Image (spheres, rainbow, N blue to C red):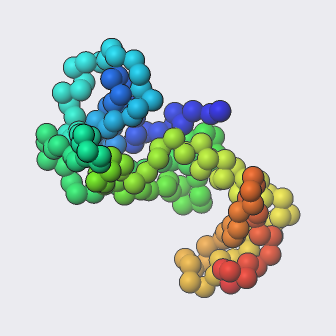
Amino acid sequence: MEVANKWTDYEIIDMANGEKLERWGDVILIRPDPQIIWKERTFPNRWNEAHAEYIRSTTGGGSWKYKKKIPEKWRIRYNVGANGIRPNEHGKSLQFNIKPMGFKHTGLFPEQAVNWDWMMMKIQNAIKTTKGRIWKSAPTRTKGAESICIHRWGICSMSICRSICMSCG
């Protein structure tokens, strides 16, 4: 198992008592996590920096308690080159809109970053093995962009289309 530890816009600051203290860009949130069973906080003073905390209800669900003003939603980035994988030709990173949801989530599972890196590596290796032939994107995409099409998933692997994809044009 690999750890998603290459983030710059996301960080687990501390964990204790069934809760995580996380930084999402400039916003710090406290969210419940039943897998955190230890009691002692490593950085007790950092918990006072939280902008919001998700409070579980005794009847199910819960709600956010806001301690400081935060945007309704904000954007964070993950540099797909963080694990030695080169970003796309424009040097762009993946961008995500973050928003505290009514059920403790934020709309993103940052631990999945290792899977994004894996997919980028597979795509880049597929591009290398096409012997220099890279299919142009469908006309609905960015004009002149070069890409390889991912159009279906198998049970354990990804299919990379090496010809013009019927789904994408």
Image-quadrant location for residue 21:
top left
Left-right relation of 136 to 126: left
Across the whole image, how many numbered discs are drawn on residues? Answer: 0
Residue 154 vertical position relative to residue 59 in the rendered view, above or below? below
- x, y percent for residue 36: 41, 26
Q: Which residue is located at x 77 percent, y 69 percent?
A: 161
Q: Which residue is located at x 74 percent, y 74 percent?
A: 135
Res 145 visible? yes
Q: Which residue is located at x 51 percent, y 47 percent?
A: 79
Res 54 visible? no
Of 166 and 59, the residue lying toward us: 59
Q: In which quarter of the image is the N terminus?
A: top right
Q: Quadrant of the C terminus?
A: bottom right
- x, y percent for residue 71: 21, 54
Residue 97 vertical position relative to residue 48 in the rendered view, above or below? below
Image-quadrant location for residue 38:
top left
